[in-house]
C-alpha cells in the first residue's frame, strides 16, 4: 500500500505524525491497519501513527502528545514552556495534561497529569497545530513542578518574550488562589519580587546570582534598578544596592564581547563612577564559582557602607 498525496502532506506538516481521526479523512480503517502491518505506519501513542522512516525525536513526540490530547487536553508544564520559546527547561522532558475522565495510557517517555480544571479555556494552538497550555497556565503548572530558581528563570523569560506580565500573573493567580491549587506559593513569591519592577531580568545568570546572594547577610538586591547618568541617559542595573551605590552586571561574554561593546560598557561604568556608583561585572566563566562571586560582592558592599 502506498499512501496518497493528501496523507503524505498531512504527515509532512505535522513532523511525521498523524492522528487516526485525521487519517480517516483520506483512507479507511482497513487501509490504516494494513499500513501498520506493512510497516508504513508505526504506532507512536494511542490513536497516533508515525510515518515509517521519521525519527521519533522530541518535536515529533510533542506533536504526537498534542494530537493525542485533541480538544481534551494540551501539552503542559516545562514542555509547554519550551514550546513557547523558553530555553531553561529540560530538552527531553515531555508532559501532557489530559481531562480527568480519560485514561492516558502513554509510553514511558511521556508524563501525564489528569485534571478537569480549565481544560477548554487554557489551551492554545500554535501555528503548526501543536496544542499547548497558555503562557499563564504553563507558568502556573511550572510553579507546582519546578524548583524556585528554575521557576523564576521560566517566569522571567516569559516576561522578557512578552508572553506574560506580572500584572497578568497577579490577575490569573487571584482567580485560581481560591480554588486551592498547588503552585500558588512559588508564583506569589515571584510576583512579590517582580510586580513593582520596570522590566524583566535580562539573563538567567542574573537570576542565579540573585538567588545565591539571597542567602548572604546583606539586603536583597533591587533588580533592574533605574539609574540616570550624567547627560540624562537612563540605564537599568541588573542588581543594585542604592544604599551602597553598588551595582552588579552579570553577563555572557557573547553579548558583551567585541571592541565596540566593551568600550560601551566601560564608558557606561565611568559614567556611573561620576555619580558615585561602582559597577562590578561577572561573566559566565566567573559565575561558575557562585560562592566566590558572592563573597566578593558582600565584601565590597560592606566596604562601601563603611
Image (spheres, rainbow, N blue to C red):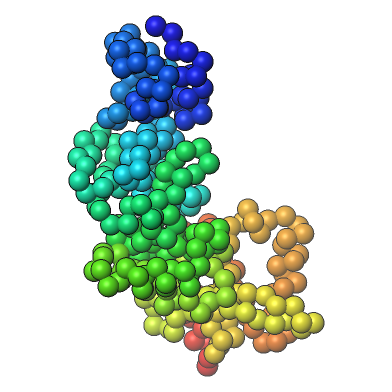
User: Whole-percent x and y of residue 93?
Assistant: 35, 44
- Nearest the eye: 85 or 260: 85
* Residue appearing at x 44%, y 35% in the figure: 59
* Residue appearing at x 59%, y 86% in the figure: 245
- Nearest the eye: 162 or 291: 162
- In this rendering, the answer to whether 31 lies above or below 58 is above
Q: Residue furthest top?
A: 1
Residue 245 visible somewhere in the drawing: yes
* Residue appearing at x 20%, y 46% in the figure: 101
User: Whole-percent x and y of residue 303?
Assistant: 53, 87
* Residue 282 as seen in the image, left or right of residue 213: right
- In this rendering, the answer to whether 232 lies above or below 256 is below
* Residue 83 as seen in the image, left or right of residue 237: left
- In this rendering, the answer to whether 42 lies above or below 93 is above
User: Whole-percent x and y of residue 113?
Assistant: 25, 49
* Residue appearing at x 41%, y 35% in the figure: 63
* Residue 26 as seen in the image, left or right of residue 112: right
- In this rendering, the answer to whether 53 lies above or below 183 is above
Amino acid at each position: 500500500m502506498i499512501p496518497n498525496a493528501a496523507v503524505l502532506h498531512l504527515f509532512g506538516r505535522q513532523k511525521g505524525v498523524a492522528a487516526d481521526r485525521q487519517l480517516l479523512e483520506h483512507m479507511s480503517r482497513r487501509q490504516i491497519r494494513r499500513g501498520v502491518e506493512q510497516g508504513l505506519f508505526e504506532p507512536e501513542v494511542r490513536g497516533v501513527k508515525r510515518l515509517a522512516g521519521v525519527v521519533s525525536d522530541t518535536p515529533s513526540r510533542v506533536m504526537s502528545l498534542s494530537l493525542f490530547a485533541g480538544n481534551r487536553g494540551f501539552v503542559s508544564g516545562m514542555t509547554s514552556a519550551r514550546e513557547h520559546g523558553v530555553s531553561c527547561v529540560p530538552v527531553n522532558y515531555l508532559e501532557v495534561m489530559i481531562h480527568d475522565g480519560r485514561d492516558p495510557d502513554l509510553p514511558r517517555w511521556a508524563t501525564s497529569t489528569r485534571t478537569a480544571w480549565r481544560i477548554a479555556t487554557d489551551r492554545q494552538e500554535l501555528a503548526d497545530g501543536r496544542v499547548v497550555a497558555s503562557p499563564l497556565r504553563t507558568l502556573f503548572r511550572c510553579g507546582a513542578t519546578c524548583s524556585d530558581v528554575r521557576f523564576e528563570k521560566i517566569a522571567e523569560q516569559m516576561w522578557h518574550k512578552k508572553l506574560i506580565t506580572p500584572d497578568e500573573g497577579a490577575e490569573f493567580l487571584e482567580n485560581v488562589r481560591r480554588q486551592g491549587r498547588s503552585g500558588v506559593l512559588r508564583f506569589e513569591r515571584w510576583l512579590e519580587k517582580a510586580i513593582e519592577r520596570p522590566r524583566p531580568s535580562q539573563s538567567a545568570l542574573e537570576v542565579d546570582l540573585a538567588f545565591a546572594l539571597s542567602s548572604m547577610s546583606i539586603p536583597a538586591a533591587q533588580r533592574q534598578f533605574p539609574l540616570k547618568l550624567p547627560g540624562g541617559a537612563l540605564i537599568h542595573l541588573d542588581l543594585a544596592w542604592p544604599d551602597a551605590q553598588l551595582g552588579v552586571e552579570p553577563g555572557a561574554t557573547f553579548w558583551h564581547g567585541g571592541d565596540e561593546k566593551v568600550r560601551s560598557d566601560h564608558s557606561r561604568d565611568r559614567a556611573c563612577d561620576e555619580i558615585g556608583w561602582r559597577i562590578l561585572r561577572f561573566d559566565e566563566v566567573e559565575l561558575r564559582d557562585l560562592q566566590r562571586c558572592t563573597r566578593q560582592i558582600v565584601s565590597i558592599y560592606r566596604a562601601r557602607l563603611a
